[in-house]
Amino acid sequence: MSTFTIIGGGIAGASIAYHLAKSNHDVTVYDRSDAGQATAASAGIICPWISQRRNKKWYSLVTEGARYYPDFIRELEAKTKQSTDFRRNGAICLFKDKHIQQLAYERISAKQEGSPEMGEVRKLTKEEVKKMHPHLTDYYPAVYVEGGGQISGRSLLNALKEAIIYYGGKWINQTIAPDSCEGTVIYTAGAWSGEYYSNPDVRHQRAELLHLKIDGKAPMKQTPVVMGLGPMYIVETDLNQYAIGTTHEDTEDFSITPSIENQDYLHGEAQRYFPDTEIHDQFMSVGLRPFTRDSLPYIGYTKDGVFVVNGLGSTGLTCGPVIGREVAAYLSGKETVLNLNDYAY
Ligand SMILES: Cc1cc2nc3c(=O)[nH]c(=O)nc-3n(C[C@H](O)[C@H](O)[C@H](O)COP(=O)(O)OP(=O)(O)OC[C@H]3O[C@@H](n4cnc5c(N)ncnc54)[C@H](O)[C@@H]3O)c2cc1C
């Protein structure tokens, strides 16, 4: 049994702590729950196969992440009796025209062989779009990816925290300086990483989501995730309630005050996707997405006794749990599925 102190209890820190505690290590998590914590603000979409990004190391991480999710959630929910709001209702991906739809269909289908967990991939008719998601516009050609899913970052953290304590770990809602920690320090501070270490260099992006309610004659529950044009997406948060986003703003500021311009912009985007219904803005949520070099997560020792995981970027909810599993195996001297040397420099 080894001793680990984890500084930062977002998805990175909590997942590592959960897997280490499950392996009988002595684990303590210190978390400050800063306003702007990315995990709580996240949209929680788990659908990595549709991305056009070509980085192989990133793709291995996120697809292994998506593959691991169902087992990870089953075990976590069974142990804690808490829901993480994880569900796989598929993803509807929208495209500007039929030509781009066809190219996307071919590109996504080509990944099926290596990633069978993505399930069926097919082009949808207008009728099928309306059947799956009655409020959504049928104006854009669509492709359906059966394995697409979503999770609530906040519910997931609550369940992980409970499981960590169940397995004998401690969760302390305050901060601690790395040099006063016991055992190996695992530094998972997200956007706040620079407070103690400049290596790796962590930058952040402010991202806003608009939460809204729509007037629905036919209330729909469990609609698929919608991947709209460009970087826009929509997730269901409750009955006839959705979050649409996101904005991307590189900044050095840690302010999380929502901007009126971004709210107007996202409201306009919501009208484009839900053209036949009244939209009522509820609130804006803001998170700070941490990035490192090459927009690839950093996973590794940065000095003796300090192991850093950061830069999970825009797919941190997707890869967080598998990073937890892999880092716990690595630090326990066990074999890993992924080559973690790919993520350290
Ligand atoms: C709006 C938005 C939408 C997103 N949507 C998706 C999505 O759909 N799918 C997806 O896969 N990913 C998504 N992401 C990305 C994902 O949320 C992040 O990559 C991930 O949550 C980062 O996790 P983290 O643990 O590294 O950082 P965080 O979640 O930010 O956690 C860091 C924690 O460390 C704590 N901390 C920092 N310093 C200290 C200290 N000195 N002492 C104690 N505690 C400290 C902070 O308070 C915080 O709680 C989204 C992100 C945002 C912002």
Image (tube, helix red, strand yellow):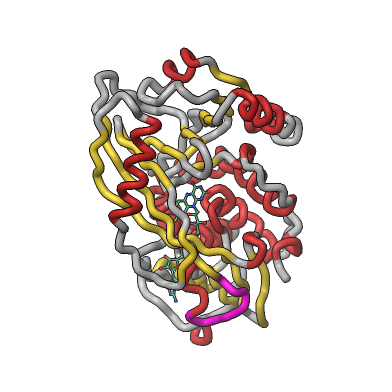
- As drawn, 214 above or below 20: above
For the residue pair 255 and 322, the one nearer the viewer reads as 255
Q: Is residue 224 left or right of residue 221?
A: right
Looking at the rendered image, the quarter that the C terminus falls into is bottom right
**Numbered circles on residues, count:** 0
Residue drawn 53% across the image and 57% down it:
15
One can see residue 345 in this view? yes
For the residue pair 229 and 6, the one nearer the viewer reads as 229
Q: Is residue 133 left or right of residue 282?
A: right
Looking at the rendered image, the quarter that the N terminus falls into is bottom right
Res. 216 image quadrant? top left
Res. 36 image quadrant? bottom left
Res. 313 image quadrant? bottom right
Residue drawn 64% across the image and 38% down it:
49
Q: Position of residue 192 (x, y in %)?
A: 46, 73
Residue 196 falls inside the magenta stretch: yes
Q: Position of residue 183 (x, y in %)?
A: 57, 78
- As drawn, 211 above or below 334: above
Region rendered in magenta? 195-202
Residue drawn 26% across the image and 34% down it:
279
Residue drawn 41% across the image and 62% down it:
37
Residue 185 falls inside the magenta stretch: no
Q: Position of residue 317 (x, y in %)?
A: 52, 50
For the residue pair 2 and 128, the one nearer the viewer reads as 128
Q: Is residue 270 left or right of residue 26?
A: left
- As drawn, 151 above or below 112: below
One can see residue 328 in this view? no
Q: Main secondary structure of the magenta part?
A: loop
